[in-house]
Image (spheres, grey):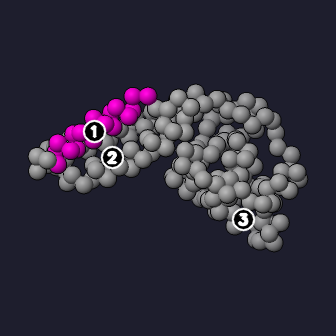
Amino acid sequence: MLTTEELSGIVEVMVVVSEEEIIDIAQELAYLRDDESPDPEDLMQLITSAMKIHWLEPIPSTAVLNSPQSSILYIAGSASFGTVPPELSEIMDTIEFEGCRSFDWDVVTSNIIPDMSRKLDRLEALVKDAADGAVVIEKPETEYSELFNLYYDYDFWLPDGLPGIGLILEDISQRLKEIKEAD
């Protein structure tokens, strides 16, 4: 079965890939390895897992030049460290893929910023709850740590980074420190 690392490596090589292409590649890979043909539902779970750990990022077809005909497309995510299956070269010779593989980073960024803003809003509400004594400080500290790591990955990965979000995170860090010192 295709692994998360291999899925990520395939997407890194292809730049943009559709769900249909992932299924085709996974089936061809299974054939070349004399494995059982993968269940499409298992592949969808693999894609979902890869998105949760930011090894894949979904992008709209409007962001892709000469987009494959698919409603859902993926690019390698901010935390992606894929492994390219050695069979991929043979698979790419066998299967004809559509179009140029390039996309608009501005569209990708415009999808990420609102998500990060929502996460920041939730974190700020959690910090306020910690200041009011409604939750223990460890909860917002954990959320802050996870969000800071995600911010760092995105800021490095996106060509123009995530302007302004780093300053908000610094402010939240300071407030967490003050709450902790007050206890």
Residue type at numbered disc 3: Pro
Q: Secondary structure at mark 1?
A: helix
Going by the image, does 78 lie left or right of 74?
left
Q: Which residue is mark 1?
A: 172
Circles 1, 2 touching at the beta carbon (< 8 Å): yes
Q: Residue at x 68, y 47 (%)?
A: 12
2 or 3: mark nearer the eye: 2
Question: Could you give the CA–CA distance between mark 1 and mark 2, rounded to whole angstroms?
Answer: 8 Å
Q: Is residue 166 magenta?
A: yes
Residue type at numbered disc 1: Ile
Q: Where 105 sits versus 73, above or below? A: above
**From this viewpoint, is residue 41 visible?**
no
Residue 25: percent from left, percent from top: 77, 55
Mark 1 is surrounded, within 10 Å at the Cα level, by few (under 14), some (14 to 19) or many (20 or more) other residues, namely some
Q: Residue at x 48, y 37 (%)?
A: 155
Question: Could you give the CA–CA distance between mark 2 and mark 3, rounded to whole angstroms?
Answer: 38 Å
Q: Where 10 sits versus 36, above or below? A: above
| Bounds of the magenta segment | 163-180
Residue 53: percent from left, percent from top: 51, 53
Mark 2 is surrounded, within 10 Å at the Cα level, by few (under 14), some (14 to 19) or many (20 or more) other residues, namely many
Q: Which residue is mark 2?
A: 144
**Which one is nearer the viewer's eye here, 146 or 24?**
146
Residue 45 location, quadrant: bottom right
**Which one is nearer the viewer's eye here, 84 or 139?**
84
Q: Which residue is mark 3?
A: 38
